[in-house]
């Protein structure tokens, strides 16, 4: 019993939007002491009633045995804490730049001999329109920096002349003016969108690695506005040709740059090769919660070993994991009036007790009831696991049927991509 108490940690979460509530809550239930700081003003109420909250994380530095930073932009702080001898899960200045500066990320891929898609960076809509006019083709408009968090601004063109991209650029010029910042025009290529990711212990990548298929559009069948994410399907593998050809080549650089945490590289693959699109050099959302559904060891132990730089095999379930967001208005848009009218303080009701697979997102807890808060409309993530993708989907959607949230909507096809993508990936030799 005494040994058990000694192993319990004080874990401080420094969060941008409260996205790691589920992780912190799970670690707390394992017996560790947890505190969370949330930076964004509109998200301050998230987690209230679930876990202890703090107004200034720096005042709790001496209390914490382990720091977990859940977003990009904290790299310099993470490096400073590591120099002080602290255990830290989080980025570095280098990995922040990989994600936030698309031009830097693409150039790093080139430096390591990884094939990239042609792209050009702009800060002027007028120059971008002139470029597409002179070089007609299909392009993707990709904002850089903090503005890339507004996922609805990413536009994937479908016209080989680029006329649809020109129309969108003209609309952005009228609505954003000079406040848009830098953005890329990247040549569009057809294939399967897939991401390879792994946990890095400061020296090397841990095995197994994770392969994820994101479902970004609002409606089933990949229709509607890009939301960032409506759900994902995934599996763990000991070896991956996609990972070996991309992220694995960053192992020495990440060690040199003092990175400890999780990193993901989203790619398009086809019969001609792998084309990396963008880095996520932090936890992915909902990726980390779906990964949690597949982990076979306590999170507190897992993250402590990772931060200590230990080399270990990650114990995971066989088969597949899937997850779907259950959301309410105004998601995926920002509209405070609509949120207050339709969603604020709405209750998450369970028809029967669900012990596993329901992950609180932007919620608070009052007298044991889960209430929606924040300002985005993301209520819960529901996960499922199974030996086959069909089993995992069935497990997940059975849970969804036992949850009542007024005005809620969610996608009904998370995981369906796999059945077509599998054939393509297998025939191209990527599985």
Image (cartoon, helix red, strand yellow):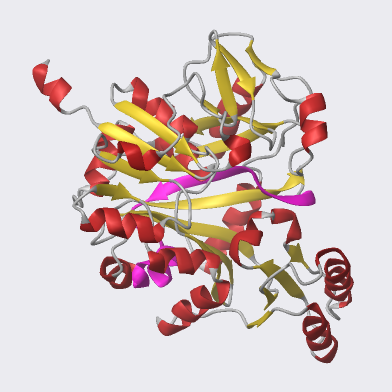
Is residue 111 visible in this depiction of the protein?
yes
Q: Quadrant of residue 371?
A: top right
The residue drawn where x is 72% and y is 24% is: 344
The residue drawn where x is 59% and y is 26% is: 363
Question: Where residue 307 appears, x then y in whole percent?
Answer: 25, 48
Direction left: furthest residue:
2
Is residue 320 visible in this depiction of the protein?
no
Direction bottom: furthest residue:
134
Q: How many marks?
A: 0
Q: Is residue 232 left or right of residue 140?
A: left
The residue drawn where x is 26% and y is 61% is: 204
Question: Where residue 85 appears, x then y in whole percent?
Answer: 18, 52
The residue drawn where x is 56% and y is 72% is: 102
Asked if residue 26 is positioned above or below residue 133 in the image, the reply reads above
Of 237 and 32, which appears nearest the observer?
32
Question: Where residue 166 appears, x then y in whole percent?
Answer: 86, 76
Q: Quadrant of residue 179?
A: bottom right
Asked if residue 353 is positioned above or below residue 139 in the image, the reply reads above
| Magenta highlight range | 223-250
Quadrant in which the N terminus is drawn: top left
Question: Where residue 260 appears, x then y in whole percent?
Answer: 31, 55
Question: Is 97 part of what is drawn in magenta?
Answer: no
Question: Is 234 part of what is drawn in magenta?
Answer: yes
Of 140 and 399, which appears nearest the observer?
140
Asked if residue 394 is positioned above or below residue 67 in the image, the reply reads above
């Amino acid at each position: 019993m005494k040994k058990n108490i000694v192993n319990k940690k004080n874990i401080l979460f420094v969060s941008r939007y409260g996205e790691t509530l589920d992780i912190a809550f799970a670690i707390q239930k394992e017996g560790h002491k947890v505190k969370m700081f949330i930076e964004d003003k509109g998200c301050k109420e998230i987690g209230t009633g679930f876990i202890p909250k703090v107004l200034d994380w720096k005042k709790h530095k001496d209390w914490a045995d382990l720091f977990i930073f859940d977003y990009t932009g904290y790299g310099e702080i993470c490096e400073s804490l590591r120099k002080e001898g602290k255990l830290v899960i989080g980025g570095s200045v280098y990995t922040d730049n990989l994600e936030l500066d698309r031009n830097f990320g693409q150039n790093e891929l080139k430096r390591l001999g990884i094939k990239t898609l042609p792209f050009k960076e702009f800060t002027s809509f007028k120059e971008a329109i002139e470029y597409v006019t002179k070089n007609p083709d299909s392009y993707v408009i990709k904002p850089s920096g903090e503005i890339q968090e507004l996922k609805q601004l990413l536009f994937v063109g479908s016209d080989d002349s680029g006329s649809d991209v020109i129309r969108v650029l003209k609309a952005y010029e009228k609505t954003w003016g000079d406040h848009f910042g830098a953005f890329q025009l990247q040549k569009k290529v057809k294939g399967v969108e897939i991401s390879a990711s792994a946990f890095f212990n400061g020296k090397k990548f841990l095995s197994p690695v994770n392969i994820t298929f994101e479902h970004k559009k609002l409606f089933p069948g990949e229709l509607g506005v890009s939301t960032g994410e409506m759900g994902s399907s995934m599996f763990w593998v000991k070896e991956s040709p996609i990972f070996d050809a991309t992220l694995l080549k960053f192992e020495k650089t990440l060690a040199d740059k003092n990175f400890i945490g999780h990193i993901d590289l989203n790619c398009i693959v086809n019969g001609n090769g792998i084309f990396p699109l963008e880095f996520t050099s932090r936890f992915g959302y909902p990726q980390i919660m779906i990964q949690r559904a597949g982990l076979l060891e306590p999170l507190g132990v897992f993250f402590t070993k990772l931060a200590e730089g230990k080399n270990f095999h990650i114990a995971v379930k066989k088969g597949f994991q899937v997850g779907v967001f259950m959301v309410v208005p105004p998601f995926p848009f920002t509209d405070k009036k609509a949120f207050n009218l339709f969603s604020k303080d709405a209750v998450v009701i369970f028809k029967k007790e669900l012990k596993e697979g329901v992950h609180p997102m932007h919620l608070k807890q009052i007298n044991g009831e889960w209430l929606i808060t924040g300002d985005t409309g993301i209520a819960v993530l529901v996960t499922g696991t199974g030996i086959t993708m069909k089993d995992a989907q069935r497990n997940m959607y059975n849970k969804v049927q036992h949850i009542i949230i007024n005005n809620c909507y969610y996608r009904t096809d998370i995981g369906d991509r796999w059945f077509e993508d599998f054939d393509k990936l297998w025939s191209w030799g990527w599985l």
